[in-house]
Image (tube, rainbow, N blue to C red):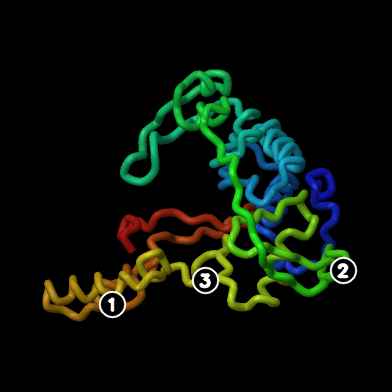
Amino acid sequence: DLIDFGLGYMTLTRETSSLSGGESQRVKMVKQLASSLTNMMYIFDEPSTGLHPRDVHLLNDLLKKIRDEGNTVLVVEHDPDVIKVADHIVDVGPYAGSHGGEIMYTGDYEGLLDSGTLTGNYLRHQLPIKKEVRTFSETFISRQSSLHNLKNIRLEIPKGVFTVVSGVAGSGKSTLVNQVFVKDFPESLLIDQNPIHTNKRSNPATFSGIMNNIRKAFGKENQVDAGYFSFNSKGACPECKGTGVIELNLSFMDKSEVVCSNCHGKR
């Protein structure tokens, strides 16, 4: 199955930490094919991330195979080629944030094209595409490398412009950028798909530092220690220890989580 779904290039001894987000998710998906489970609900979050368009059809075959074994498959996805093969589509919108949160369309692909939603208009190629590009005069040049699948190549990136590194799965995109280029230019800011922290209690508020001001403000207003408004110390739910969920270990599946019945996810 690993070979069938475009992972044949991967050595079995390769560290999982070196896999791209798309590779990791496909390995997990292939694992589920071997479980022989039926009547299950499988949820995948943007499984096409990191995939070259040529490899998306392999992903679609995998999703359909899981479905054909008697399971329900729910996918959160933006890739047009994945949307096209879905049996049923739910389009959420109309925009992002407080301007979203509505079901704009449900039905098949042909109906989506005629729905008039942003997604439907995009798929009908009715949204404008930028045609002018910036010019450049200077470049960043990395060292030559043969790490993993790289064949003694070096990367030259123009300064001051928007550059995309593309290629089929396993061609070395993530290795070239994340492991070679970043090491040669350590001043670069690498923003990847990894969790913000390994601590399950972390969230955007704690990461950005805003939570410190929130704790202090609530503590001052209620004349108590700010720690009572933290899910890392005094304020944490005693049942879930401030995570908001309870972890379930099932022998035949990966670990799963359910909302804490004590704090109802409020942590």
* Mark sitting earlier along the chain (1/3): 3
**Residue type, numbered disc 2:** Asn
3 with respect to 31 (left or right): right
In contact (CB < 8 Å): disc 1 and disc 2: no
Residue 91 in sight from this viewpoint: yes
**Badge number at residue 198:** 3
Q: Quadrant of the C terminus?
A: bottom left
* Mark sitting earlier along the chain (2/3): 2
**Residue type, numbered disc 1:** Lys
Coordinates of residue 95 in the picture (x, y in percent):
39, 38
**51 over 123 or under it: above or below:** below
Look at discs 2 and 3 and give the one toward the viewer: 2
Q: Secondary structure at mark 1?
A: loop
Q: Secondary structure at mark 2?
A: loop
Label 1: which residue?
A: 234
In contact (CB < 8 Å): disc 1 and disc 3: no
**Badge number at residue 152:** 2
29 with respect to 145 (left or right): left
